[in-house]
Image (tube, grey):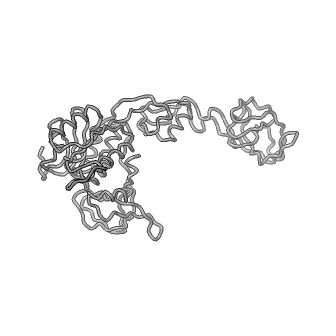
Amino acid sequence: MNHCDTTPLLAYDEALAQLTGSVAAHGNTVEMPLLQARGAVLAETIVAGIAVPACAMSSMDGYAINTADLAASGATRLPLSQRIAAGDAATTLAAGSAARIFTGAAVPAGADAVIMQERVEVDDQGIRFEQRPPSGQNVRPAGNDIRSGTAILQRGCRLRPQDIGLAASVGLQSLPVFTPLRVGIFLTGDELVEPGEALASGKIYDSNRYTLHGMLESLGCEIVDLGLVGDTLAETREAMLQASTQADLVVTSGGVSVGDEDHVRIAIEQLGELRLWRLGIKPGKPLAYGQINETAFIGLPGNPVSVFATFCLLVCPVIQVMQGRDWRKPIALPLRADFDWPKADSRREFLRARLVCDGDGQTVVQVFPNQDSGVLTSTVWADGFVEIAENQAVRAGETVNYLPFAQFFD
């Protein structure tokens, strides 16, 4: 493979397709108790073994009746034959009678409607009401929410609180889920020091490790952190080998360009396979992808914004596929630009942006004024990307595609 700067850039869509198409779910599963399952990825489609509700239930406090007992019009008086609270076992409704019933209680056999208590007069003789209700009024039929035998949760979904509640509603105590994906990380660069240490001349504090940690944790990954690795080929090779034996995926930052101290690209070629490394996106042109033995590897650029952007745009999809998730490309929202972007670039650009309301109360998109890949403050100020197509300029008022950061970590 030719590594000089004249190597053609790989288009973003093609890179994304290659990356997501070259990995698969890691396959390890476990049965996890419901109360521990939030954020896990479901390993099997779940089919309800019961109906919910299991029987017809009242949606109101009132009186259960059989509408066939009633005249077509005029006042009706019925004696009370039973009282049914939520959780009680109801007996069949006696012909020509009514049952006092409460919200969530089982509607007795023989009854087909519930009259709200506000529309009923009660005395020692029973109840009296003026209007005949239609059959089915205020009754939730059996299976109104879930029918037995229907799929309620799909394989590959990342479990949310409401998903877990739904599983509990059909009586499940646990769910089959994929075990957390293990991601090994290390960072290269002799200029980097850990926060809290003295900052000597020519040094900078490492922020990429902390950004990567937060993003990986947001995706529910287990992290194997090898820390900072010196800018030597030997140290880089050793870190790669160590990470590959402990993780399902290895992600690094720095050392993927063509400089004398950029050893990640060389090491991956020596230890495994390098598939792509120059992308037609901005920020984030230098990116390495391949394998160390059988372990997938992605080498991100070193600039802080490039790390954040390429992780969102390319690593998140890879991780989600490897987690067994039903990954789909984030949906771009068409919104009006509140900025000019006159300089078209041959690479696809992802500008740090945020949503604001204009003077008319309409939602528009602003971009951070300094889009340099070293300006990490732009990622804090922003809540998403504006995607600018190759060779495209933008004028204020035109429609642009906006990608919320939150979509990448759903």
Position of residue 21 in the picture relative to residue 165 (left or right): left
Between 334 and 258, the residue placed more toward the observer is 258
Between 235 and 75, the residue placed more toward the observer is 235
Q: Position of residue 368 (x, y in %)?
A: 33, 63
Q: How many marks?
A: 0
Residue 268 seen in the figure:
no
Between 408 and 377, the residue placed more toward the observer is 377
Q: Answer above or below: position of 311 versus 392.
A: above
Question: Which quarter of the figure has residue 225?
Answer: top left
Residue at image point 35% right, 61% down: 400
Question: Which quarter of the figure has residue 99?
Answer: top right
Residue at image point 65% right, 39% down: 140
Q: Position of residue 408 (x, y in %)?
A: 37, 48
Q: Answer above or below: position of 376 versus 149.
A: below
Residue at image point 79% right, 37% down: 98
Position of residue 268 in the picture relative to residue 73 (left or right): left
Q: Identify the residue at the far bottom of this view.
A: 359
Q: Identify the residue at the far right of this view.
A: 124
Position of residue 248 in the picture relative to residue 168 (left or right): left
Quadrant in the picture for the N terminus: top left
Q: Position of residue 374 (x, y in %)?
A: 26, 57
Between 59 and 166, the residue placed more toward the observer is 166
Q: Position of residue 7 (x, y in %)?
A: 14, 50
Residue 77 seen in the figure:
yes
